[in-house]
Amino acid sequence: YCTDMSLVSEKRKSYGSGEYCDNFTDLNLSHCFIGTSLYVRLLLYTRSNLDCGHELNHHHLSTQPLFNLTQPTAFVIHGYRPTGAPPIWIDHIVHLLAEQEDMNIIVVDWNRGAANLNYFTAVSYTREAAHNLTGFIMTMEEEGASLSSVHLIGVSLGAHLAGFVGANLKGKIGRITGLDPAGPMFTSATPEERLDPSDAMFVDVLHTDMNSFGLRGAHGHIDFYANGGADQPGCPKTIFAGKSYFVCDHQRSVFLFLCSLNRTCSLTGYPCSSYSDFLDGRCLQCETFKPASCPVLGYDVSQWRETLLQLGQTKVFFSTTATLPYRKLSYRVDMVTWNQYLRWGVVYIRLHSGRNFTEARIDHKLLRLEQYTSTRLLAQFDEDLPNIQKISLRINTGNVIGPRYKIRLLRIRFTPLERPERPLMCRFDIIMEENMEVAFRPLPCDSRL
């Protein structure tokens, strides 16, 4: 697709003693203003050359001693690059993938094509780049590789590029992972014009920016929606933050996936019809997936794969913190109220361990408290405190001028969702006043005062 081969040799640098490495194409804004012609480079990394990429010949794989066709192969496909700079996460994902298992890791460098101020031009190049990559994978198959061992990981526009490759190969690719598939120009696309479940034997998708650069809807066998799939915690809310305002939510998909590969954040997704239902505590059980429990975002999906393929398209939701390790600790809170007067309020729960505490604020909607009513809540905490010695509870009704009404809890029970080895915590017959905090020591649920 590009006749100027000097563009490739420019990206070589000395490594160690006399060894040369092929680096990701580094462009600048001048290239983006002028426009680039598509050129697809395939940079191979393995455990033996993690820090030194080797560009593969598209047609003569037998001459590539580092490329083992009997091993799994993961292709990493970036998206639109409006500034021409290499993605900051490329080295990270290569190293983390190599930790999962011994495999070929191929970075699909289509920066000459993706780097263009005209987004529509970059979109048009995805079909050509997919045709190029399809031919390479067909050559792999001819030389002994199994299509079922191929995993395409596509970011943004790269997710649709991966889908086009999968469609070209009649859905025989083993797996496609789409990280916040691009939305602009794909919102009204048919399944044939974007990533969809038929593009691979298994398709998993992570959504983080559906109200801007990401694509709304469900497009895989399983779709993970972080914080509902739109606004991410810690990302700027106003345009005055500059570039971060535009890219933060969209890029969060990559950082969440990297964190899952690093196994520092186990992000559990709960099957549900909507994020609001999830926050309401209506979708906190995963009997369908037993004994494997709820699906977890990440590389290893083997224990949930068969169930998900049987279910068809499954939506799962989870919440995160604003920073690493992103994970929230979730409790299912079941309580039975016996207050005389109907009250509406926001619930604050604090877990105390020694001098440390963590707080959950359940405020996505007002909670209805009435006589002899069982209520289920989802309480999500930013910190994981293992030995809970005290729990404090406050129900803020907003009542500031009238008398404080009493609220009686016949029972309150805390079930740790991601820590099933921990005991359930209960307390019985608590008398509290609205807007006032009450503290108590949790008891085993088979005990009473």
Image: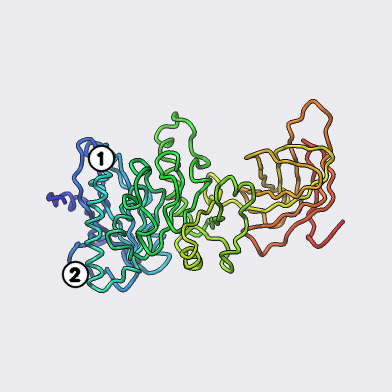
Image vertical order of residue 447 relative to residue 440, above or below: below
Instruction: Give the residue at x 23% y 46%.
Output: 113
Quadrant holding the C terminus: bottom right
Q: Amino acid at mark 2?
A: Thr
Name the residue nearer the viewer: 195 or 300.
Answer: 195
In the image, taking residue 259 as reference, residue 182 lies left or right, namely left
User: Residue 178, which numbered label?
Assistant: none
The answer to which image quadrant residue 71 occupies is: bottom left
In the image, taking residue 48 as reference, residue 335 lies left or right, namely right
Instruction: Give the residue at x 25% y 45%.
Output: 124
Looking at the rendered structure, the secondary structure element under dot 1 is: loop
Name the residue nearer the viewer: 16 or 298.
Answer: 298
Image vertical order of residue 191 relative to residue 211, above or below: below
Residue 396 screen position, x and y as percent? 73, 36
Name the residue nearer the viewer: 278 or 248.
Answer: 278
Q: Amino acid at mark 1?
A: Asn
The answer to which image quadrant residue 47 occupies is: bottom left
In the image, taking residue 104 as reference, residue 211 lies left or right, namely right
Question: Can you identify the residue that label 2 sits on?
Answer: 63
Question: Can you identify the residue that label 1 sits on?
Answer: 116
Marks 2 and 1, how far apart in space?
Answer: 34 Å
Callout count: 2
